[in-house]
């Protein structure tokens, strides 16, 4: 009862004030008819408070978001399923779902006729031009009587995540170079070491041809084993993104960092659909959630885009190189660089030496501050270290830049970085 009286609306308080005033005036003026009107006006909110205080709402909410992984600028649909299993008189529900401001205004709904077994489905859309991971909810619920005299507040504490991935653009096919990374196709590789029993057989799988059963190994192991003459060679690619604050310019979605993240996302999708197993490396090192994988292309892009959705600028002066010490390096390396300083030259040289083929897109970050700024020297610094590189400015189309990167041939320093010693110079 105390909670119900505390939930009196302005209308409910006005009714109480009007009832008391009418009763006082009736006593002073000696008007019994006015007394009855005052009692009726005063009793209405009080009776409503008694009824609501004895009501038992058993509200349940199921919130789903479709899809939970959406590209920036694309809408997602939020479905709300509300049920009431309590025995209560009819009323009105005032719903307000809490969403981050980047997803739009908070949706509000008014639902009437709340009774036992009451069910309602509500749908609304959210859209964000900013990448990131957001929580939708919690939802606040206000239960009101049909006269609007009392409102009781409730809240559902559950939330649902929504990941907004960077914008991507389709990229054309270009020659990527490297002995095993040119096309991205799975290449058969025959085993050359080990005995037939230990190397060239595997467990029987449903659908295998029975003519490939290796009976000697099956008898030794105790289960069916089949011959495996070849194993697919997986083309690997390392996608590097320089997300240091000192390497980028601008603020918000118009910054060079956002352009770099969008370019990295487009490259990740392109390489995955070309058959590469892609891992993401940033200035802080390898992202564990996007390590080299062996799934279908559509499943490969999910972890990569989720990792890129939450990439933020880091206050780190130097690039982390722990991932270069792994024994599984090699293959194709595609990097998206911002500004390159003298302290970064040894690192990018080492990255080029550890790659079978090194390609880079260098953002002219000063152009994000001033369109008339002189071209930066990041492309030249990378080219001197053997990278196939092309610059990217704010108004450039990424697909055209990617096409130009395919046309750029390896420099002489790149040939030396891949293992060929530089030509000796004649002594003077």
Image (spheres, rainbow, N blue to C red):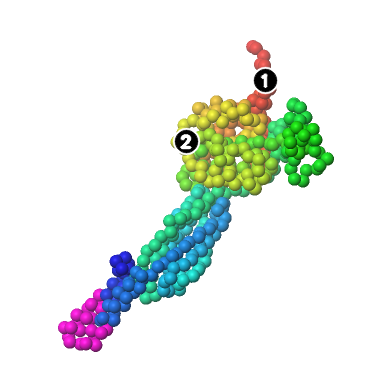
First along the sequence among labels 1 and 2? 2
Which secondary structure lies at badge 2?
Answer: helix
Residue at the limit of the structure toward the left, as seen here: 28
Identify the residue at horizontal 17%, vertical 85% (top origin). 29
20 drawn magenta: yes
Task: For residue 268, say whether it is visible.
Answer: yes
Numbered tag placed on residue 421 in the rendering: 1
* Mark 1 neighbour class, 10 Å CA radius: few under 14, some 14 to 19, many 20 or more: few
Identify the residue at horizontal 23%, vertical 84% (top origin). 35
User: Residue 331 is drawn in which quadrant?
Assistant: top right
Task: For residue 376, say whether it is visible.
Answer: no
Residue at the limit of the structure toward the top, as seen here: 428
409 drawn magenta: no
Residue range corresponding to the magenta coloring: 17-37
Identify the residue at horizontal 52%, vertical 56% (top origin). 127
Compared across the picture, whether 312 is left or right of 170 comes to left
Q: Label 2: which residue? A: 246
């Amino acid at each position: 009862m105390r909670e119900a009286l505390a939930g009196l609306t302005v209308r409910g308080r006005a009714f109480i004030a009007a009832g008391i005033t009418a009763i006082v005036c009736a006593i002073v003026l000696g008007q019994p008819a006015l007394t009855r009107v005052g009692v009726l006006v005063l009793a209405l909110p009080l009776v409503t408070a008694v009824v609501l205080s004895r009501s038992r709402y058993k509200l349940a909410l199921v919130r789903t978001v479709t899809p939970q992984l959406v590209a920036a600028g694309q809408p997602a649909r939020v479905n709300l399923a509300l049920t009431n299993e309590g025995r209560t008189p009819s009323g009105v529900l005032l719903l307000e779902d809490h969403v981050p401001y980047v997803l739009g205004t908070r949706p509000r709904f008014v639902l009437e006729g709340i009774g036992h077994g009451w069910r309602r489905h509500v749908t609304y859309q959210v859209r964000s031009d900013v990448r990131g991971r957001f929580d939708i909810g919690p939802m606040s619920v206000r239960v009101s009587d049909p006269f609007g005299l009392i409102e009781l507040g409730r809240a559902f504490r559950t939330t649902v995540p929504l990941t907004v991935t960077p914008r991507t653009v389709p990229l054309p096919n270009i020659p990527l170079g490297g002995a095993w990374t040119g096309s991205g196709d799975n290449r058969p590789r025959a085993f050359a070491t080990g005995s037939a029993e230990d190397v060239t057989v595997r467990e029987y799988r449903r659908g295998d041809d029975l003519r490939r059963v290796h009976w000697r190994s099956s008898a030794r192991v105790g289960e069916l084993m089949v011959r495996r003459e070849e194993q697919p060679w997986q083309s690997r690619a390392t996608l590097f993104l320089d997300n240091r604050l000192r390497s980028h310019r601008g603020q918000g979605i118009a910054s060079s960092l956002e352009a770099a993240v969008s370019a990295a996302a487009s490259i990740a999708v392109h390489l995955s659909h070309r058959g590469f197993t892609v891992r993401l490396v940033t200035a802080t090192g390898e992202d564990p959630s996007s390590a080299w994988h062996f799934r279908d292309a559509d499943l490969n892009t999910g972890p990569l885009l989720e990792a890129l959705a939450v990439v933020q600028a880091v206050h780190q002066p130097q690039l982390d190189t722990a991932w270069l010490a792994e024994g599984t390096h090699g293959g194709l390396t595609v990097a998206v660089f911002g500004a390159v300083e003298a302290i970064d030259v040894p690192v990018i040289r080492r990255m080029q030496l550890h790659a079978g083929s090194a390609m880079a897109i260098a953002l002219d970050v000063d152009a994000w501050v001033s369109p008339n700024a002189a071209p930066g020297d990041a492309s030249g610094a990378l080219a001197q270290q053997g990278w196939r590189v092309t610059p990217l400015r704010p108004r450039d189309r990424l697909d055209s830049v990617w096409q130009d990167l395919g046309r750029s041939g390896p420099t002489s320093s790149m040939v030396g970085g891949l293992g060929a010693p530089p030509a000796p110079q004649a002594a003077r």
